[in-house]
Image (tube, grey):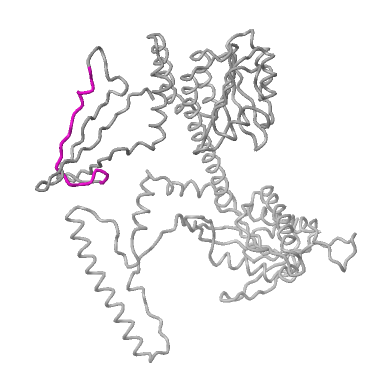
């Protein structure tokens, strides 16, 4: 915008009947408006480039070493907005400078505005950006008042960060913003006009302004006001820089252009800071959700898989690049690696052929009645690896679900079902926190939790905590009200009933998935706890003999006689029912 523009001459084409076209790019001057400097004519100092290359000037060509060279045709930049603005700056500002003092002042302000860009980039947040701009505007342009009008919604804006250059102006010019700013309507204001046109609104004489707000500030001694739009993400209006002077028509053309540049830089940095803030907020929410789904001790073990600089991350992603038959997709340039992979490829091919031949042989022998092929001899390869897996001993598992939930939900609206489950499960969550039990997951109307998984302590204490939790779950369920049915009176209170099953044993736990990782436990102990719940009675707690041994000496619990429960694929087990919970 200083006017030092390159004026590219026309390409002259000379040709005759016997010669190829000769294209010569001439008059390549970088002197801009300063064609005559120090009494020396610079117009003839441009360098000319002759070329007999037939490549069109608007096309991309390559040199002998493969370097891409793009030659631009005449008028390539004619429609460029920044070039057009620079030409306007030349015509409206530089061409009208008459004294050396004006040139020095313009150069000093231009340098200061250019230096502002780096300070805005280093500002930690949006508020710091406003402070940096204010520290430049007030002393550099000698404005009497500076403020920011930030968009609140489609009809209002917030006036904030009001700054004045003299203490005597503090009360008269800065009283209307307060500490947190003042919300004002957009309609009928210069800020509203900026929001509609996305252009500067300059009022050289506030006494003649059509805006009522300007007539008000005229009474405060302000005679000229400049409102410059702050645009973010392209052409989205975010607010205005509003500066004012006590003198009439105090902002020259070059002042308005430089302040417009400041607003452009401020808008870009505000958008950057807001995007960063949104990303940090999103990351915080994601981390909170992750901690809600996965125990913190497990997260400590797997968070390295999201750190791109960690060895675990690199190793995992290199393992994930293995194809379905084990062929690696990452190629190494070393000769040893290429020979190794070549030999491995041959071996894989032979194994594939042997595997298919085995299928054909067994298929023919079994006369097409269906065959189960032993694929253990051929490793098909892993497409992914579990983030985490571990065996844990003496874990107490609790299952609970609602009696007759499927039939009950048919008579309820979907939103009523969700509201009831939300009410019930929130109560269960609070009880888990109270008793030191970890919620595992919910599946439909089933609620699953564990104790002793990652907590160092006595398994007897974990069993006692889970049993007390189960008793409180039954009590809390009685406080949940089912939606009123037409057949019941309005004053009737009907609550759901739950069944509870508990077992203690060894489990395998792990984190499955990468897009939405989920912590889960599995094993025969989990299946047995689920079976205890399925064979329990309404509002009763059904436990295995292993669990009963841990709490049988407690006087606070009364049990029915031992019974025998058959578990599918697991045989018969002794079990106990806790007396009815009051």
Q: Residue furthest left?
A: 18
Q: Which residue is painted at 59% across and 49% down in the image?
A: 292
Quarter placement of the C terminus = bottom right
Q: Which residue is painted at 66% across and 55% down in the image?
A: 466
Q: Can you say whether 489 is above or below 113 in the image?
A: below
Q: Residue furthest bottom?
A: 367
Q: Residue furthest front?
A: 17
Give coordinates of residue 312: x percent, y percent.
Answer: 38, 49
Left or right: residue 446 compared with residue 390: right
Give coordinates of residue 137: x percent, y percent.
Answer: 51, 18
Asked if residue 525 lies in the magenta stretch, the reply is no
Give coordinates of residue 172: x percent, y percent.
Answer: 68, 12
Picture quadrant of residue 542: bottom right
Give coordinates of residue 53: x percent, y percent.
Answer: 16, 44
Q: Which residue is painted at 46% across and 49% down in the image?
A: 302
How many numbered marks appear? 0
Q: Is residue 458 visible?
A: yes
Residue span colored magenta: 41-59
- Decide which of 495, 87 is in the foreground and name it: 87
Q: Can you say whether 374 is above or below 254 in the image?
A: below
- Decide which of 82, 534 is in the foreground and name it: 82
Magenta span dominant secondary structure: loop
């Amino acid at each position: 915008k200083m006017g030092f523009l390159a004026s590219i001459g026309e390409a002259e084409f000379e040709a005759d009947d016997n010669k190829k076209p000769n294209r010569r790019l001439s008059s390549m001057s970088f002197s801009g408006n300063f064609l005559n400097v120090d009494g020396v004519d610079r117009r003839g100092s441009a360098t000319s480039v002759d070329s007999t290359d037939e490549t069109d000037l608007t096309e991309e060509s390559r040199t002998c070493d493969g370097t891409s060279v793009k030659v631009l045709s005449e008028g390539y930049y004619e429609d460029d907005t920044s070039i057009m603005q620079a030409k306007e700056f030349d015509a409206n500002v530089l061409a009208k400078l008459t004294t050396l003092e004006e040139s020095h002042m313009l150069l000093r302000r231009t340098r200061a505005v250019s230096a502002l860009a780096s300070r805005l980039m280093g500002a930690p947040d949006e508020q710091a950006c406003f402070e940096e701009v204010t520290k430049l505007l007030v002393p550099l342009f000698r404005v009497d008042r500076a403020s920011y009008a930030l968009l609140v919604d489609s009809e209002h804006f917030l006036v904030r960060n009001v700054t004045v250059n003299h203490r005597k102006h503090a009360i008269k010019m800065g009283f209307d913003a307060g500490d947190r700013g003042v919300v004002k309507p957009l309609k009928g204001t210069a800020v509203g006009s900026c929001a509609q046109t996305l252009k500067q609104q300059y009022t050289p004489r506030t006494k003649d302004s059509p805006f009522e707000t300007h007539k008000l500030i005229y009474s405060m001694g302000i005679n000229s006001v400049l409102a410059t739009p702050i645009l973010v993400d392209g052409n989205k209006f975010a607010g205005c820089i509003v500066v004012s002077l006590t003198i009439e028509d105090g902002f020259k053309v070059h002042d308005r252009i430089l302040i417009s540049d400041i607003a452009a830089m401020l808008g870009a940095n505000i958008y950057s800071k807001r995007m960063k803030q949104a990303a940090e907020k999103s990351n915080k929410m994601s981390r909170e959700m992750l901690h809600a789904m996965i125990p913190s001790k497990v997260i400590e073990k797997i968070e390295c898989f999201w750190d791109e600089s960690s060895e675990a991350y690199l190793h995992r992603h290199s393992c994930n690049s293995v194809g379905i038959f084990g062929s690696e997709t990452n190629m190494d340039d070393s000769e040893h690696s290429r020979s190794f992979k070549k030999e491995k490829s041959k071996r894989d091919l032979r194994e594939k052929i042997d595997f298919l031949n085995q299928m054909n042989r067994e298929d023919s022998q079994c006369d097409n009645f269906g065959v189960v092929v032993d694929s253990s001899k051929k490793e098909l390869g892993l497409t992914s690896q579990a983030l985490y897996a571990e065996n844990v001993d003496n874990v107490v598992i609790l299952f609970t679900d609602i009696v007759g939930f499927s039939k009950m939900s048919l008579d309820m609206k979907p939103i009523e079902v969700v509201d009831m489950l939300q009410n019930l499960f929130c109560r269960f969550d609070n009880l888990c926190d109270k008793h030191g039990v970890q919620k595992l997951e919910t599946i439909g109307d089933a609620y699953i939790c564990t104790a002793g998984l990652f907590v160092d302590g006595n398994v007897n204490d974990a069993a006692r905590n889970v049993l007390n939790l189960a008793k409180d779950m039954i009590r809390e369920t009685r406080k949940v009200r089912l939606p009123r049915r037409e057949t019941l009176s309005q004053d009737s209170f009907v609550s759901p009933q739950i069944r509870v099953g508990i077992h203690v044993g060894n489990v395998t736990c792990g984190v499955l998935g990468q897009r939405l990782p989920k912590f889960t436990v599995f094993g025969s102990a989990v299946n047995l706890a689920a079976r205890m719940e399925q064979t329990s009675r309404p509002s009763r707690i059904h436990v295995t003999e292993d669990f009963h041994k841990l709490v049988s000496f407690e006087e606070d619990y009364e049990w029915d006689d031992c019974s025998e429960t058959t578990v599918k694929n697991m045989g018969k087990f002794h079990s106990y029912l806790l007396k009815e919970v009051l």
